[in-house]
Image (cartoon, rainbow, N blue to C red):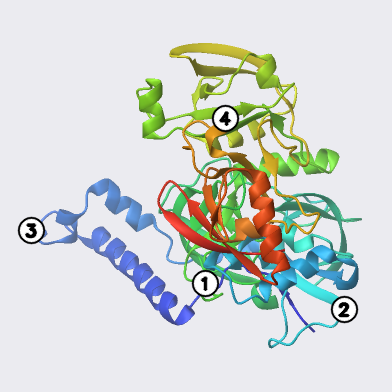
Amino acid sequence: MNDRVNSDISTSRKILRPRRLALLGTVAALGVAVLAASPGSSPLSVNSLIPPAQAAEIAATPSGFGDLVAKVKPAVISVRVKIDQDNDKSAMLQQNRMDSDEQTPFDQFSRQFGFPGGMNGMPRQRHQVITGEGSGFFISADGFAVTNNHVVDHAQSVQVTTDDGTVYTAKVVGTDPKTDLALIKVEGKKDLPFVKFSDQKPRIGDWVVAVGNPFGLGGTVTAGIVSASGRDIGNGPYDDFIQIDAPINKGNSGGPAFDMNGNVIGVNTAIFSPSGGSVGIGFDIPASTAKLVVAQLKDKGAVTRGWLGVQVQPVTSDIADSLGLKEARGAIVDNPQDGSPAVKAGIEAGDVITAVNGNAIKDSRDLARTIATLAPGTSVKLDVFHKGESKTVTLALGELPNEQQAKAGEDKVQPGAGTPRLGLSLAPAGDVQGAGQKGVVVTEVDPQGPAAQRGIQTGDVILNVGGKPVANVGEVRSELAQAKSSGKNSVLLQVKSAEATRFVAVPLA
């Protein structure tokens, strides 16, 4: 039976495991040496090389993870789903993309982790019930469990298997595609083992232990460290991933990553993988994000987010210089949407939002994440740089629509009249401050669209389509329709980003 391609994190154990064991062995040896050293040790003794505080910390480092795993492993579950492919157009589209030979390394992660792939390269039958597997973990004794949205998306049935082999039927309580989180529940139980989310942000270099269901094996434990935080992987406007090097593979999606206290610091959701297997670069949804999302899913089955009603972009050094800002920080407003909370508060195009409730805003993505964590109706204070002067405005947030409407001054490249869909919202470059006069600016990207899969991001400028310069959305539509009518499967875009100008071949969906 074809397994669902849960593009979760894999590892090369032949390379990584000996190194991990060598590191632990070194730490244990240092700890013993420190404890055994005497005041009269030679100048080259361990005591002379390691400060007492650090030596004590090394001595206290655990020699293994057995106690931790025994504590948390019973709360981790394997998640198995069934999908009727014939009734699931979204799954079929995902299948087509997974079988394509034109994948970039980032095509291997995120939403694609949980979707089906062909068996040995053979095409699937037109109608087929597909099974897929992922991971999850209980967060309460009465059966609430967390997993990834892409694991249970479009599932007709969900089963979970606990560490002792017991199988339960679960229902989907709610999902949030924007953060790739889902809440499921096993009914009729009151004594299930569970774990808690951490209240502390992990430090880079902290130990992390991942538990999950790679390749359907179930109950698999791997260890590593926190490699980085705040990662933006182009998955959506709320990207803020923790990067870890604990090996995780297909099937680990939705599983937990634990700190040394047994608390969940993140939910495994993505990898960077040129080969499809783990290369030690995995991404977790932070516990802070998961807690907020799960609480709303439990309360009302969906997530609502605050909304300003502005299209923004980062403040570059050139923009900062032209506006008289001392630092290239904040988010510059392109075009406020008519009738939005921002417009009602007097925010105009060209204003720079520098802080929310006194907390400095780094860039446009930081602003989007900050506002999204606040509930609709919340009163917020915005520090705004307006026409050379700083001011503070107070407004009540609106509710972010489930599907963003086109903003003033922009349009979406929609299918229809023979026009392929790229999943982009565009505006003439001349209408967006700081974008120049040539081409069209990408003002919004559908994370599930073909353009996003080729790395096109908000703020990029498309200079030409199919070798012809474009200056507005109409010209883009025309060139896409022409490419499609010519029988082409992809169209070549010349794209200018902050880093460079490049050519990108985007499939014509």
**Dot placed on the residue nearer the N-terminal end, 2 or 1:** 2
**Dot placed on the residue nearer the N-terminal end, 4 or 3:** 3
What is the CA distance from the residue labelled 4 to the residue labelled 1?
Answer: 40 Å
What is the CA distance from the residue labelled 2 to the residue labelled 4?
Answer: 47 Å
| Residue depicted at 72% across the width and 63% down the height | 509
| Residue linked to disc 2 | 128
Amino acid beneath label 4: Asp
Q: Nearer the viewer, residue 504 or 272?
A: 504
| Residue depicted at 50% across the width and 72% down the height | 274
Which label lies toward us, 2 or 4?
4
What is the CA distance from the residue labelled 3 to the residue labelled 1?
Answer: 43 Å
| Residue linked to disc 4 | 334
Residue 43, quarter of the rendered image: bottom left
Q: Is residue 503 above or below residue 251?
A: above
| Residue depicted at 34% across the width and 57% down the height | 59
The answer to whether any part of residue 385 appears in the image is yes
